[in-house]
């Protein structure tokens, strides 16, 4: 019983973490082009792999 509860808790935890990360990303994607240009400028500043 306890193991199952722990599994559910960790799943819910990781789900909430994923949502917390993806929500601002989605907001950036669906915002006007201004944000896109800013993101491109930011990506260009990152060191190339």
Image (cartoon, grey):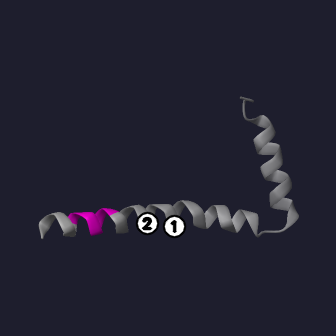
Which quadrant, please, contains the C terminus? top right
- The quadrant of the image that shows the N terminus is bottom left
Q: Name the spot of residue 5 as percent of width and height, x first.
A: 20, 69
Along the viewing direction, whichever of 30 and 2 lies nearer the viewer: 2
Whether pointer 1 and pointer 2 mark residues with C-beta atoms closer than 8 Å, the reply is yes
* Left or right relative to 40: residue 22: left
Foreground residue among 41 and 30? 30
Relative image position of residue 34 (x, y in whole percent):
86, 61
Quadrant of residue 11 within the rendered picture:
bottom left
The majority secondary structure of the magenta stretch comes to helix
Of 28 and 13, nearer the camera is: 13
- Residue occupying image coordinates x 76% and y 70%: 30
Q: Which residue is mark 1?
A: 19
Q: Secondary structure at mark 1?
A: helix
- Work out whether 18 lies above or below 43: below
Q: Residue furthest left?
A: 1
Horizontal arrangement in the rendering, residue 13 relative to residue 18 (left or right) = left
Residue 8 quadrant: bottom left
Rounded to the nearest angstrom, the CA distance separating label 1 from label 2 is: 6 Å
Category of crowding for the residue at label 1, using alpha-carbon neighbours closer than 10 angstroms: few (below 14), some (14–19), many (at least 20): few
For disc 2, the neighbor class at 10 Å (few under 14, some 14 to 19, many from 20) is few
Q: Residue at x 67, y 66 (%)?
A: 26
- Rendering coords of residue 38 (x, y %): 81, 52
Q: Residue 40: x percent and y percent? A: 82, 48
Q: Which residues are magenta?
A: 6-10
Is 12 located above or below residue 38 in the figure?
Answer: below
Residue position for label 2: 15
- Relative height, residue 49 to residue 32 (above, below): above
């Amino acid at each position: 019983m306890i193991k199952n509860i722990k599994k559910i808790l960790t799943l819910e935890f990781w789900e909430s973490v994923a949502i917390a990360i993806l929500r601002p990303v989605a907001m950036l994607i669906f915002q006007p082009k201004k944000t896109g240009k800013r993101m491109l400028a930011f990506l260009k500043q990152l060191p190339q792999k």
